[in-house]
Image: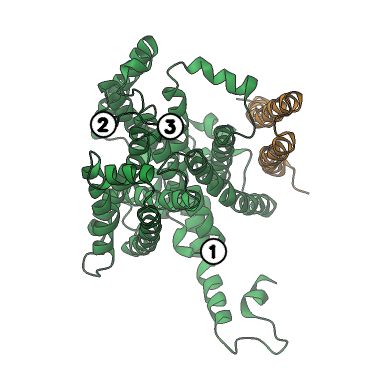
Chain colours: A orange, B green
Amino acid sequence: MSDKKVFTIQLITLSFNWLLAIGVTWWFVHLVIIANQVKDAQTASLWISILAITVFWILAGVLSYVFFSLHRKEA
Amino acid sequence: MSYQDLHDEDEVLFRPIYQTSRTFYVVVIALAAVFLFGLGCYIHQLFYGLGATGMDEPVSWAFYIVDFVFFIGISHAGTLISAILRLSKAEWRRPITRMAEVITGIVLAIGGLHPIIDLGRPDRILHLFERGRLQSPLLWDLTSVTAYFTASTIYLYVPMIPDIALLRDRGGKLHNFYRILAWGYKGTPRQKHALERAINILMVMVIPIAVSVHTIIAWIFGMTLQPGWHSTIFGPYFVVGAIYSGIAALVIVMVTFRKIFHFEDYLKEIHFRYLGTLLLVVALLWTYFTFAEFLTTFYGHEPAEMRVFLYKFIGAYAPFFWAMVFCNFLLPIVILSNKKTKTIPGILVASIGVVIGMWLERLIIIIPTLANPRLPYPTGMYVPSITELGIAAAATSAFVLGFMGFSKLFPLISIWETKEGREHSIHEVSMRLRDYLPGQRDEAGVEASVKAEI
């Protein structure tokens, strides 16, 4: 298997994590909009969303940091 | 030390990946048969709905939710214990962390499916995405379990990268698979530093996530006004119970793999003794919480609460309640507080008792409350159907199968951490030890370990 192919597969697997983070963000934004529309604990919904979204983004960020650090060429 | 030297020294850790006994295949076939039977039970439930289970009004949550809470509790074995041991620089953690993290990954995947199985109509999970209410503990639970699963999978994977690189360098049939997963790791100082930094961030992150997961599960019950559930201590009580069952599950897994794969040189008696001490401390903590919970209920003597209380103590669920007391309190405390019985077999017996006891605890928390509702309904009774028993058996076999599958792909004990322990820890620990003692600074007032780091 060529290096390029290996790298592409690795990038695809990494992107799943970002897909999850973006999916969770999209879903929570959707729920916050609904909470706002029906005036149902908007502030609590907003804070819970901010907390959850941050966790998923940090996790995706840490994994990406590892990925790009390991692939960076030595000086 | 070259990679080849390392291979020779720790060859026993690679052996499970390259050598497969006939017994392994027999066990896999037997477990796969149990799993398929459970799958058949679930398909039957899909066709006939929850009528195929023993659940009926008023007991509308039963085996599936018991298993859900139990499996999520077991998951605290891994990431939480591993993170705490890493954070506290407990050197004896090195051969333990990998197995603990694998437990977390597998049981979270299994446990997380149980609420969907409990739905009867799994398509209705989509309502949660479409119209979920963010102020509902059920939605917090879905989010925290997903976050915990993501965090613990990353936390399992990142420290495994150096070992995957070793497997890649060995070649073989799965060379390309390991090449993909190794992410180009060559063990350069910069790569090591990046991994170390990521592990440090992750271990700090997973502790609050793990605590939040079981606290939120407790809140699903505690935030209702149901007798036996509406309690302020449920959050920490569930977390303590989760750590308790987690340590016990970890001991069982360690003893099993030590015996099967001859890891005696890595998983020594001292590891079990330390885990046994930890188990004893958590046993006492769990007993304290249980006592506080029941004493408060009894002292208040509120009629609805007392119906649930008596149902557990002298009613239909009394055998399960007293079995729980025996398994979670008497058995582990007697075994673990006695030097003569605090041996590997003794700790194993105590751990098996705790795992059974913690499952019973989940059972007696959930069912007696539902069987004795606050509303004036007659007392309910719950007996699981063959469908529920089949699915529970399938879940357990999926756990063992998952572990067996993992052992065929990756080392069960972290090889690079073992190597690091040999090369650096003895010196590092002796430096640290000097710092703990008085009068161990140099002329400039710098402590020994700080000097070593510089």
Query: Splitting the image into 4 quarters, where does residue B442 fall?
Result: bottom right
Looking at the picture, do discs 1 and 2 lie on one chain? yes
Front one among B215 and B365: B365
- B106 sits left or right of B344 in the view: right
How dense is the environment of label 2, judged by Cα within 10 Å: few (below 14), some, or many (20 and up)? some
Pointer 3 or 1: first along the chain:
1
Q: Are marks 3 and 1 on the same chain?
A: yes
| Residue B9 picture location, percent across and down | 41, 55
Residue located at (50% from left, 51% from top): B232
Circle 3/circle 1 CB separation < 8 Å:
no
Q: Which chain carries label 3?
A: B
Q: Is residue B162 visible?
A: no
Amino acid at the residue labelled 1: Ser
B355 left or right, relative to B316: right
- Circle 3 sits in a helix, a strand or a loop, which is it? helix
Q: Distance between the residues labelled 1 and 2?
A: 38 Å
> Observer-nearest residue: B420 or A32?
A32
Amino acid type, callout 3: Ile
Q: Mark 1 points at which residue?
A: B88
Q: Which percent across, then down, holds residue B228? A: 40, 44
Q: Mark 2: which amino acid?
A: Val
Q: Quadrant of residue B132 in the image? A: top right
In-front residue for pair B365/B127: B365
**Sequence-wise, which precedes: disc 1 or disc 2?**
2
The answer to whether one can see residue B253 in this image is: yes
Residue of label 2: B27
Q: Pinpoint residue B421: horizontal percent, then vertical percent.
A: 50, 62
Which residue is denoted by mark 3 in the rendering? B110
Q: Which of marks 2 and 3 is nearer the N terminus?
A: 2
Local packing at callout 3 (Cα closer than 10 Å; few below 14, some 14-19, many 20+) is some
